């Protein structure tokens, strides 16, 4: 039987539906919990609704960014497994690395000659255990997070807010670093050296965000769309250099 | 910890840990189905070799990411964030936007609930778009010219990361003044695995923050 046909068989769509449901159910459970606890900290329903809606909108841009990578992944490993792996933990890049590593452990290439049923099983297994690495760490340690926070941060509220701010800023400095240290790239077609469009997108995204945040102070509705607008500005600016 | 935190954490942790366990077990279902329905008999030593190689590459991330993102996302946010993934791309921006729109400060009791709701919202969008992509992606994408496709997949993330950095930076601009140079210098001149860079970016910056906080330069 053809491997692609097996990988896209109904039983795996069933497995995928289970895994995706788990993710959705946890989110649903936490929404219920948050609504239940809201009155005890003085939050009203309307504010909770606003927060949820903001999250909905904020994820739109990044979700679209994934689309092309997701399709590449579906072509390589089939629909259901892509659906499972991407709804849980993985970015498309990480999962493809894991899929290839699994195939390489059998001495074959993903989807290449010699990649049969058993090799596909090893490849899937490798993606799973990799994902479980994160889940296991969270299972074992996340419930101690607040205690550790109390230990490092102590009772100094000001220092604790600086810890959070530093972690966030450090993380995103790490994210933008690859673009900044590579100001120029070589054009694939003309081989000429040109400005890195990703750097342009990054800088334009940052600058326009500053503008939209300022505007949001005056026009509150902008706050919900600031991130989306900044992404579009970055896209348009970067596109000029592609 | 106050009464709210104790009660909230108790409920969040109970569902969170249960779900992590369930997700780990269920993620092996496709392999189990391959074994029983299609007679796959993968070689055990190849499986272990695959596991060993991938764990060696990612074990740093297993440890570093839950800790660093944990401080930003909170407890409930961590369970959802790790389970659904792409924390830097989706969960943190969602939590930030939710806090901004409602004008509530991160790290407070209200902030914990607000960012939890924001992250839950982001999961809904994420799953809906992913599901549409899985079922209709090929058709949708064939309607777009190649140039636009390339722009969408290579430019959205840099624009997003730049925007989110700016969002944080405008709250505490001084931290960027030492965090960004530190990250750039280390990345330019020192070769290490990618999770090592995250470690330096977060904990290196934290050490500098501590020193500058004591010196009353960072407030």
Image: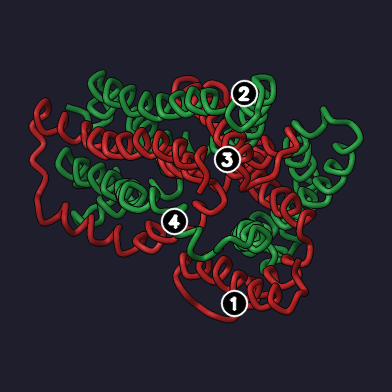
Chain colours: A green, B red
Instruction: Give the mark, 1 or 2, whose residue is nearer the N terminus.
Output: 2
Q: Which mark is residue B112?
A: 3
- The part of the image, by quadrant, that contains residue A163 is bottom right
**Label 1 vs label 2: CA separation?**
43 Å
Q: Which residue is mark 1?
A: B186
Is the residue under label 2 in contact with that under label 1 (CB below 8 Å)? no
Asked which secondary structure carries label 2, the reply is loop
Dot 1 surroundings within 10 Å: few (below 14), some, or many (20 or more)? some
Dot 2 surroundings within 10 Å: few (below 14), some, or many (20 or more)? few
Mark 2 — on which chain does it sit?
B
Q: Which residue is mark 2?
A: B143
Q: Which residue is nearer to you in this view: A98 or B180?
A: B180
- On the same chain, marks 1 and 4? The answer is no
- On the same chain, marks 2 and 4? The answer is no
Mark 1 — on which chain does it sit?
B
Dot 4 surroundings within 10 Å: few (below 14), some, or many (20 or more)? few
Mark 3 — on which chain does it sit?
B
Query: In this rendering, is residue A120 above or below B158?
Result: above
Q: Identify the residue at horizontal 48%, vertical 22% (top origin).
A: A32
Asked which secondary structure carries label 1, the reply is helix
**Label 2 vs label 3: CA separation?**
42 Å
Is A217 on the left-hand or right-hand side of A234? right
x, y percent for residue B39? 8, 32
Q: Identify the residue at horizontal 26%, vertical 18% (top origin).
A: A10
Dot 3 surroundings within 10 Å: few (below 14), some, or many (20 or more)? many
Is A83 on the left-hand or right-hand side of A221? left
Q: Which residue is mark 4?
A: A147
Is A68 on the left-hand or right-hand side of A44? left
Q: Identify the residue at horizontal 76%, vertical 66% (top origin).
A: B219
x, y percent for residue B76? 47, 39
Q: Is residue A1 visible?
A: yes
């Amino acid at each position: 039987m053809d491997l692609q046909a097996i990988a896209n068989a109904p039983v795996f769509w069933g497995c995928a539906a289970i895994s995706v449901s788990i993710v959705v159910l946890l989110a649903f459970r936490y929404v219920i919990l948050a609504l239940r606890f809201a009155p005890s900290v003085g939050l009203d329903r309307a504010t909770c609704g606003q927060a949820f809606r903001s999250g909905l909108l904020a994820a739109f841009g990044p979700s679209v960014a994934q689309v092309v990578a997701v399709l590449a992944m579906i072509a390589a490993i089939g629909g259901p497994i892509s659906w499972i792996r991407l709804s849980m933990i993985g970015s498309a890049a990480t999962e493809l690395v894991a899929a290839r590593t699994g195939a390489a452990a059998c001495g074959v290439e993903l989807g290449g000659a010699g990649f049969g049923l058993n090799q596909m099983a090893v490849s899937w297994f490798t993606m799973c255990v990799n994902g479980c690495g994160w889940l296991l760490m969270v299972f074992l340690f996340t419930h101690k997070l607040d205690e550790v926070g109390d230990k490092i941060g102590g009772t100094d509220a000001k220092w604790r807010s600086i810890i959070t701010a530093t972690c966030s800023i450090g993380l995103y400095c790490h994210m933008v670093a690859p673009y900044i240290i590579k100001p120029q790239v070589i054009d694939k077609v003309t081989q000429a050296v040109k400005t890195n469009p990703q750097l342009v997108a990054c800088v334009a995204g940052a600058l326009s965000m500053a503008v939209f945040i300022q505007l949001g102070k005056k026009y509150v509705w902008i706050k919900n769309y600031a991130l989306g607008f900044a992404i579009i500005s970055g896209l348009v600016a970067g596109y000029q250099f592609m | 910890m106050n009464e709210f935190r104790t009660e909230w954490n108790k409920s969040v942790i109970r569902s969170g840990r249960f779900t992590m366990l369930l997700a780990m077990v269920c993620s092996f279902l496709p392999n189990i189905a391959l074994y029983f329905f299609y007679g796959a008999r993968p070689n055990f030593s190849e499986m272990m070799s695959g596991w060993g190689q991938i764990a060696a590459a990612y074990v740093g991330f297993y440890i570093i990411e839950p800790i660093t993102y944990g401080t930003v996302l909170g407890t409930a946010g961590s369970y959802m964030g790790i389970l659904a993934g792409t924390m830097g791309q989706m969960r943190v921006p969602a939590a930030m936007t939710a806090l901004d729109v409602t004008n509530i400060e991160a790290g407070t009791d209200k902030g914990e609930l607000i960012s939890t709701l924001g992250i839950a919202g982001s999961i809904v969008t994420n799953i809906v778009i992913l599901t549409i992509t899985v079922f209709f992606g090929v058709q949708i994408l064939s309607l777009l010219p190649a140039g636009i496709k390339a722009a969408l997949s290579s430019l959205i993330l840099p624009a997003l990361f730049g925007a989110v950095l700016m969002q944080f930076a405008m709250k505490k601009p001084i931290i960027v003044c030492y965090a960004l140079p530190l990250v750039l210098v280390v990345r330019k001149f020192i070769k290490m695995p990618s999770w090592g860079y995250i470690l330096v970016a977060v904990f290196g910056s934290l050490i500098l923050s501590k020193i500058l906080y004591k010196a009353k330069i960072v407030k």
